[in-house]
Amino acid sequence: MTEARTTDSGGVGARVARVEDRRFLTGRGRYTDDINRPGQLYACILRSPHAHARIKGIDKSAAEAAPGVVAVFTGADMAADGIGSLPCGWLIHFKDGSPMKEPPHPPLAVDKVRHVGDQVAVVVAETYRQAKDAAELLDVDYEELPAVVATAAAAGAAVAVHDEAPDNICYDWEWGDRAKTEEAFAKAAHVTRLDLVNNRMIPNAMEPRAAIGEYDPGADEYTLTTTSQNPQLIRLLLCGFTMGLPEHKVRVVAPDVGGGFGSKIYHYAEEVIVVYAAKKLARPVKWTAERSESFQADAHGRDHVTHVELAMDEQAHFLGLRVSTTANLGAYLSTFSTCIPTILYATLLSGQYKTPAIHAEVKAVFTNTAPVDAYRGAGRPEACYLIERVVDVAAREMNIDRAEIRRRNFITPDMMPYATPVGLEYDSGDFPRNLDDALKLIDYEGFEARRQEAAKRGKLRGIGFASYIEACGIAPSNVAGALGARAGLYDSAEVRFHPTGSVSVMVGVHSHGQGHETTFAQIVSERLGVPMDKVEIVHGDSNRTPFGMGTYGSRSLAVGGMAIVKAMDKVIAKSKKIAAHLLEASVEDIEYTDGTFTVAGTDKTIGIAEIAGAAYVPHNYPLDELEPGLDEQAFYDPKNFTFPNGTQICEVEIDTDTGVTKIVRFVAVDDFGRVINPMIVEGQVHGGLVQGIGQALLENCVYDPQSGQLLTGSFMDYTMPRADDVPFFEVKTNEVLCKTNELGVKGCGEAGTIGGAACVMNAVCDALGVPHIDMPATPERVWRAIQSNQTPAAAE
Amino acid sequence: MSETLSLTVNGKPVTVPVEPNTLLVEVLRQQLRLTGTHVGCDTSQCGACVVHLDGRSVKSCTMLAVQAQGRSVTTIEGLARPDGELHPMQAAFREHHGLQCGFCTPGMVMSAVDLFRVNPDADEDEIRAWLDGNICRCTGYHNIVKAVRTGLEAMKAGGARHAAE
């Protein structure tokens, strides 16, 4: 496909090259580890080598005496200073209404370590090498304990990860209508059943996490510079829970951040440790993760074991869906861990289908593994994977074409708004059109010929679909609160016109690859009629930006972008009054278009830059009615989630001798609502799809089931997708405008990952002619499936 | 037991004290404050640290600084022209949206520029194979591969000019 050239500026819909690129391309980005402070010390964190052990004692003396060492702190030191537990941001309840088990999560372990990589102590020294050498001298007396590792075996295991949850169950929760679902199954003509594992992922943003703590004793002020997707949220948690500081004394900065994918949402122990150490030592303290620490101590993703059943009538109309999932939360509750396999999972089980009855049970368990939390998609890829897999198996069992079974059960545009049986109301979307467009793009009709041609070359060719829907921009805050959220889910923006006509926009969301400095500037430039090079987007500094919730869940445009629109509305409303004064007309007669105010029916006009000048130099100005200045702030709390949706189709070829799967075609047709910058949107789709492909074919976090040792602890063992593992993508967007926000936008950050894994696995299973194999479809697994299934699809 | 390391970095002579076990990337990032060269792993896999040593791409996290004694290093900061005009490969990455978070970008660009020396006519499969030592988590590689193809073309077209400089 030919791609249009990029431009250097433009409004909504323009393919504008990114404002932020120049600094990254010339090595002038400013990531946390690039920053150094005068007098800075370095922290090395000693991590547990055991999955589960009692700490009987820590002898610090040799480490304290080592060259360059300034201090050594343990969990006991922090506890003595009253440092609090890392909090969990979402309260989930058991079926009987009792609250989830919420054991403490000290930043440095106190009595026990609970996963390999758990923080035991911190050594602070003049150089990182000195700190690291001294950490080796720390003598920790461990009493090793048996470990609970496997997801499916954790509930009721003989060993408890926490005394607070003797059966290792954090919560046993349900969603949907059990009775109605049982009725549906009772009258079913056919029930398709499937057991599947959603494999554990390690997010691996390319920039390892880092944090710098600073304390100014004169002003009694703290600064934390950290690799975060949401610096304001980190400040809230640091002040309200862990460090217990007043917010006006704490600044949290997230400068350029090298990717997040969810893993940089959370309040991590290291953020507390560097701030604590900086206060104790009155010197800046920096910590930067080595990649092996990222593998051990970043929050992981997914890790579900699920049984799913789909009830159908004779014509394969879906009657009911029943899901039972065990979700591994790891050793401690990470910031948003508890809502991922519940609120962001079970509410999506309707998918794009009009299944009338759905019931889900989710048991969340503690294990001696790293904490598990949101990873790109967060609950929604897990939901999509099970739906799209069980639909494929159902089509196979009912002998119906897989496109047809989807079409037959789709929610159609005339049914919008559509209330699902799992609590969401879809506002818009044209699911059949996305499927039809994707089928055309891939030439579905010609597939059998391609399959036969591949068979002649000794290859098994398969085709797979994923028709996904996701819910983005969790909202409104009061509904989220009723569901257990302990924070608001609005966002904020301040639009500050400067006296000579340039504009700074301070936002509560954060950009770590998404290109907000460009996309937001396009919206502002168009609506305020100010050239893009006079618009600055400011994010990532709690001292410069209003309080916002940050970036995750594809919320930045649908929530943060709308906050900008609301602030601009206020700017324009005030400007109209100023224009009315300057043009000697009544406000009702002032019309506004593209940065120009006009008295209706006349040629009397004034530009917004002149208005800004008048607002800051208010000599001819209605001072008795209006304040000077042109600087407005807005908080926006959405009315509903947004629902990006689409269909992805891919074709794979499997080498029967080696079991290697190659993706040969991949098309994605997505409805993201209004597209602001197609270039950026396509990039988000490509990247998301590759994370889906990675889960399906390559990536797998493996712990030894007995010892709890992390077997995939480096890029040598954990297979990251590389350039030669993945294909080019053919992507198309169908814009069905979102009805619940004025921009009409739905969000695009996670879409690729939500459908990607399901799409690839459906193609792999089709190629192999088997109902199911678990992810990742490594050459070994695929080869074994070929060996145990001597009637592969290509031979049928 | 520090040693004296003299080398050329981005065209300028530099002399710094180093320990025998100091890595080249540590000299670049910490002593010379050239923080465009990144460290993304500890196993020589990710390629965020790629620089040029006497015109060839190397992983600066996997080289002792003393091995660069008397040699010439170019980092991402030394790629654009002094007047600020981007190198054709940098420009191609911008044109094709070949970067998102920007963390792998310096290594990607430095690797891609070295591909011109080895195989200026590399097709898309050859580009993918060449970039096997550079991991990107954001872009899905689609736009990187397109950018590299365009960048190689532009370097070819500009070859006479660059050779003359």
Image (cartoon, rainbow, N blue to C red):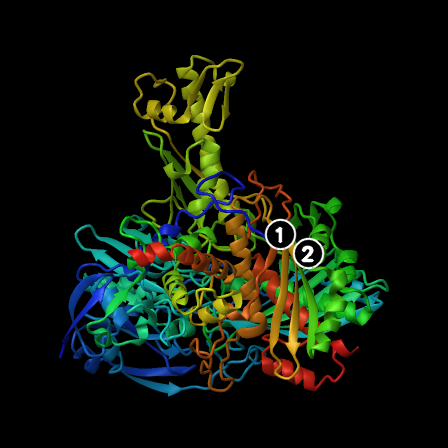
Q: Which of marks 1 and 2 is nearer the N terminus?
A: 2
Q: Quadrant of residue A296?
A: bottom left
From the top left corner, tell me how far across and down residue A626 is, in percent: 38, 22
* Front-most of residues B16 and A697: B16
Q: Which chain does the numbered disc 2 sit on?
A: A
Helix, strand, or loop for circle 2? helix
Residue A693 tag number = none
Q: Please report the residue visible at 46 percent of the width from the left and 13 percent of the height from the top.
A: A585
Residue placed under numbered mark 2 in the picture: A441
* Front-most of residues B77 and A713: B77
Residue placed under numbered mark 1 in the picture: A732
The amino acid type found where label 1 is placed reads: Lys
Q: Vertically, is A589 above or below B77?
A: above
Q: Which chain does the numbered disc 1 sit on?
A: A
Q: Please report the residue visible at 47 percent of the width from the left and 43 percent of the height from the top.
A: A7
**Do the numbered discs 1 and 2 sit on residues whose CB atoms are within 8 Å?**
yes
Regarding residue A229, the answer to whether it shows in the image is no
Circle 2 packing at 10 Å, graded few (<14), some (14-19), many (20+), is some
